[in-house]
Amino acid sequence: MKGISEYKNFEVNSANLKHIRTFAREVFNKSDELKNYQEELVLALAEAAQNIVKHAYNGKPSSDTIKVEINYSEDGLLLIELFDKGQAAIPENIKPRNLDDIKAGGLGTFFIGQIMDQVIFKTSKIDWVNHLILKKQF
Amino acid sequence: MTYKVLEENNISTVFLNGEIDMDVTDKAKEVILPLIEAGKEVHINLKDVEYMDSSGISVLIESHQMGQEKNTRVVLKEISKSVLKVIMMAKLEQILTIE
């Protein structure tokens, strides 16, 4: 099935990461193509959501919401978008870690890059501060 | 995430269960790191871990590094398929001790 367009808002809280994953699994399960990549796609989306909680909100809960939007078009383009109102991200500072450097941290961004085709940061969307777009063509 | 710890022949085996993300990494560290700090050989059994993200991987890296500092073995046991996939994506299968 293609032509999926769904979104959901989640309060900023690390305890909500599991609910974000549940939402993502439910949406990805609606398409056979996405279902085959479900684990990887859920990981990419969850890493992005985790980065919002960790960096845009310094790991602290907030009554703000993270909007997660998933669109899968007829032509096989998957767009995962995350919107938040936390501290503005500085795209130049968001770098995956060098895998030769064995340390905790920076892995999430590396995973996202491995799984998705393209990662786009926007910081000027009306009503939101950060707008992250993860793209993958199937 | 839930866990249980079994002590046998001076080896502490930590059985982790469920999903390991940023929300539970502190809890996982609180269980694992003091055992390593105490100089015990620690086995981390991951057969019932259904999901692990970069935060969970960080716990494994930290445990491994503390094991090296304390000169004690930290071994990953019975890694579930989904966790192994993430470990391999991070290219850590040659670095962490896996049995």
Image (tube, rainbow, N blue to C red):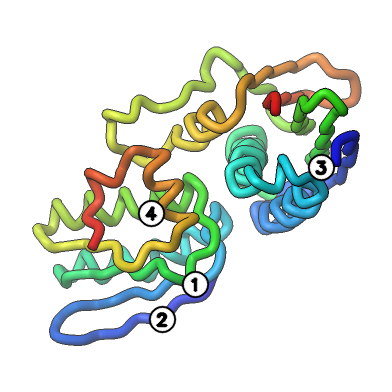
Q: Is residue B70 left or right of residue B63?
A: left
Reading the image, the residue beneath label 1 is B17
Count neighbours of disc 2 (C-alpha within 10 A) and say few if under 14, some if 14 to 19, many if 20 or more.
few
Q: Chain of mark 1?
A: B
Reading the image, the residue beneath label 3 is A64
Q: Chain of mark 4?
A: B
Task: Kindly report the distance in space between the C-alpha atoms of the residues bearing marks 1 and 4.
Answer: 14 Å
Reading the image, the residue beneath label 4 is B59
Answer with mark 1 or mark 4, whichever residue precedes in sequence: 1
The type of residue carrying mark 4 is: Val
Q: Name the mark nearer the viewer: 1 or 4.
A: 1
Q: Residue at x 65, y 33 (%)?
A: A56
* Residue B46 pos. (x, y %): 40, 66
Say above or below: A109 vs A35: above
| Quarter holding residue A1 | top right
Answer with mark 2 or mark 1, whichever residue precedes in sequence: 2
User: Regarding mark 4 in the picture, which secondary structure is present there?
Assistant: helix
Q: Chain of mark 2?
A: B
Reading the image, the residue beneath label 2 is B4
Q: Residue at x 54, y 58 (%)?
A: B51
Same chain under badges 1 and 3? The reply is no
